[in-house]
Amino acid sequence: MNMKKNNRTLKTIIYTLLILYSLVTLAPFVWSILTSFKTTAEIAGGGTFFPETWSLDGYQTILESQFPQWVMNSLFVALLTTVFNIFFNTMAGYALARIDFKGRQVLFSFLLVLIMIPSQVTMIPLYIVISDLGLVDSQWSIIFTTMINIGYIFMMRQFFINFPRDVEEAAAMDGLSRFGTFIRIVLPNAKAAVATQGVFVFMGVWNEFMKPLLFISSPDKYMLTQGLNALSKTFKNSTQWDVIMAGSLLSIIPIFILYIVLNKYFITENDQTAGVK
Amino acid sequence: MGKKRYNNIQGYSFLMPALVVILVFTLVPIAYAFFMMFFKVDLLSGTRTFVGFGNFEKIFSDPKFWASFQNTFKYVAVVVPIQTIIAMILAALLNSKVKFDRAFLTVMFIPTLTSSSAMTLIFMWLFNNNGLVTNLIESVFGAKVQFLTNPDLALTVIMVMNIFSTVPHFMVVFLSGLQDIPGSLYEAASIDGATKVKQFFHVTVPQLMPITFYVVTMGLVGCFQIFDQAFIISNGTGGPQNSTLTFSLYIYQLAFSSNDMGRATALAFLLGIIIFTVTFIVNKLLKADEVNG
């Protein structure tokens, strides 16, 4: 009897904590959504929690700036990078798992060492390589340096180690080449792993801040994150937080749409290096 | 014989794109780094002068380096334990057979989706004069706190923000670990009369140890490299009074404001050494703890 009562108090505590944390999670977003609909005058004067007068000025200012151009830039770079990653990481993971070639073990151990090198350690020399290749201020600098990812190569390798062999063997019997088998049989069967990888690569590029900051300097080539930061500098001085919040929220929307549509790929297998341990 | 050679060609052609990218954009920069640390490199004039350990000497005698050293370590020491503990607790709460767990999870995961730049701008506005947090504190305590211009508080805002945005990711990692713990362990504990809270400390925490290693390691590596938030909040300066100057931000300043690529690379190399050393020590300590416990 006492045990049951204890359990009920515990359940109440658990729900309270979960609801509280969910509210804490949502609060900054709700606050910025409300802010984005306020007038600048209201924000400068202190203002209340809810807008006194609802205004779309913030959104209008954002859409009249270079913001739409930056959205297109980020979409172009992120989509292309995602396609490259899907093909190249999956091919590499497949080779490491399935093709018995000379030096496979050595190569695998070598990649394990490389993945542990923090990206910022090589960032400055990487900038020099980019500059030597004449890629500074080109979007290709971001695409080329992000088009493979060792973490996802490992994830795909792990996936193919557990993938049934007979499907490929049947395809090989039918006279398909290895690459043909890969494209027509292997890739479609790896849909879930490929989707997980794709979602996280896209989000990674979309949210990337340091590389664009280093590599790209012309405002018309800015990536969205970088443009947002540049915009905020101008509007902060005039306390136009409605504009900044409108821009921040609009910049998150594409990822949110992905999150709603492909929810299961975001949460179930989101740990990209789980297969490495 | 033919089969073997065929396999070699196949293997390397499948790996070719990845290997080329790794060679050009990872291995060449690493090799470059080992060379550049010992040179004074001026990208504008294209001159390179050998300075031996001169870059390192300059770094160690630079008060800005020690400021960034202190800030980064403070940041790591606060953020890594807190985010690990919160993530573990939330995962345990979500795993305790609650209703709507998927709905909670979906909401709680949102900060992980948000880019560092949008998140930082949102937090700057929360902690600005007239921001939600500042207003709340004013209405409760009657004092207006200037978070972003106060050298004692600016880094705290970045800490809070990072905890807020990385907890959900690690929570999901813990959650998948929790689902692998055999239910029989909990049954045995409950037959012995252990309460749910006791079960958490005596079954859940020890069983999660391997996941905790992973979360702490990832947390350390990520936190030591903190850049975006510090850059955006301080507009690249690391201010007020160098209070948000982190290692990475200082590397950036050396390379692009002072145009001293050699010294920037030397500092990046130091950062790499620090990350490896600290990760190694912390993992050893955690492992020793596990053996004793």
Image (cartoon, rainbow, N blue to C red):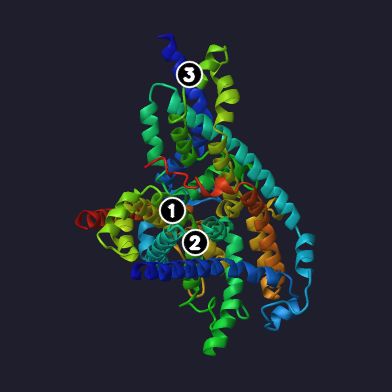
Asked if labels 1 and 3 share a chain, the reply is yes
What amino acid type should be assigned to the residue bearing mark 2? Leu
Cα–Cα gap, marks 2 and 3: 44 Å
Instruction: Read off the residue under disc 1.
Output: B175
Which one is in front in this view, the residue at disc 1 or the one at disc 3? 1
Which one is in front in this view, the residue at disc 2 or the one at disc 3? 3
Question: Element at badge 1?
Answer: helix
Q: Is residue B267 left or right of residue A49?
A: left
Q: Quadrant of residue B66?
A: bottom left
What amino acid type should be assigned to the residue bearing mark 1? Leu
Q: Depth check: B129 or B167 in front?
A: B167
Residue B27 location in percent, x, y? 45, 38
Residue visible at 46% across and 22% down in the picture: A165
Q: Of all residues shown, which one is farthest toward the top?
A: B1
Instruction: Read off the residue under disc 3.
Output: B9
Check contact, mark 2 vs mark 1: CB within 8 A: no
Question: Element at badge 3?
Answer: helix
Q: Which mark identifies residue B249?
A: 2
